[in-house]
Image (spheres, helix red, strand yellow):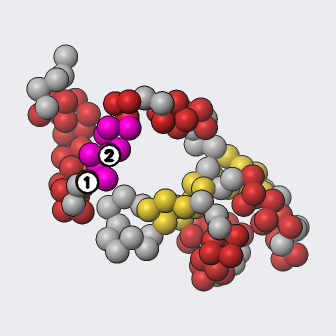
Amino acid sequence: MKILHSKMTTQELANCVGMAKQTINRWIREQNWVTEPIPGVKGGRARLIHITPEVRDFLSSTPKLRHLSLTLKAAEPDSFYHAQDKDPVWRQIQEVLGMMTPEEKQRLQLLLVREGLRGFLQQLNIAD
């Protein structure tokens, strides 16, 4: 049984279903699958594919893949993401991140990796 996670790179999905990465990229365009950029990857071409029920249905209806047993495995419940959409602080953080340059985002990412959340909050002087 092959496992499809809630989000996968084109290479991960290609490996999972035994297809070429180029085929997956073509399906993304043709089927208008939902994708998002991978943070920290330059050029904006690296994407995560949201493995929605439509993606799963498409894969299971493809003649070459009908024999595969594909299981959707969500890393986290969907409600976790939707609850954040209503949070004004979360929306403001997203807006600020959207305005940052790629270099600023990379420096922030390095800070988070190095210091963790506690160190990040201390830097902002809002840690308990």
Disc number placed over residue 7 in the picture, else none: none
Query: In the picture provided, is 34 more to the left or to the right than 2?
Result: left
Query: In the picture provided, is 84 more to the left or to the right than 50?
Result: left
Question: Crowding at label 2, few (<14), some or many (≥20) Cα neighbours within 10 Å?
Answer: few
From where the camera sits, is residue 15 visible? no
Extent of the magenta region: 91-98
- Seen in the picture, residue 128 relative to 22 is either above or below; the reply is above
What residue would you read off at disc 2? 95
Task: Please provide percent x and percent y for residue 85.
Answer: 48, 36
Q: Is residue 17 magenta?
A: no
- How far apart are the alpha carbons under marks 1 and 2? 6 Å
Q: Is residue 93 magenta?
A: yes
- Seen in the picture, residue 48 relative to 123 is either above or below; the reply is below
Task: Please provide percent x and percent y for residue 125.
Answer: 11, 26
- Seen in the picture, residue 86 relative to 51 is either above or below; the reply is above
Identify which residue, 25 or 94, lies in the foreground: 94
Type of secondary structure dominating the magenta stretch: helix
What residue would you read off at disc 1? 99
| Secondary structure beneath label 1 | helix
Tag 1: amino acid? Met
| Secondary structure beneath label 2 | helix
Identify which residue, 100 or 68, lies in the foreground: 100
Task: Please provide percent x and percent y for residue 108.
Answer: 21, 49
**Residue at 38 percent of width and 38 percent of height:** 91
**Quadrant where the C terminus lies?**
top left
Query: In the picture provided, is 9 more to the left or to the right than 69?
Result: left
**Residue at 83 percent of width and 64 percent of height:** 60
Task: Please provide percent x and percent y for residue 94.
Answer: 35, 44
From where the camera sits, is residue 94 visible? yes
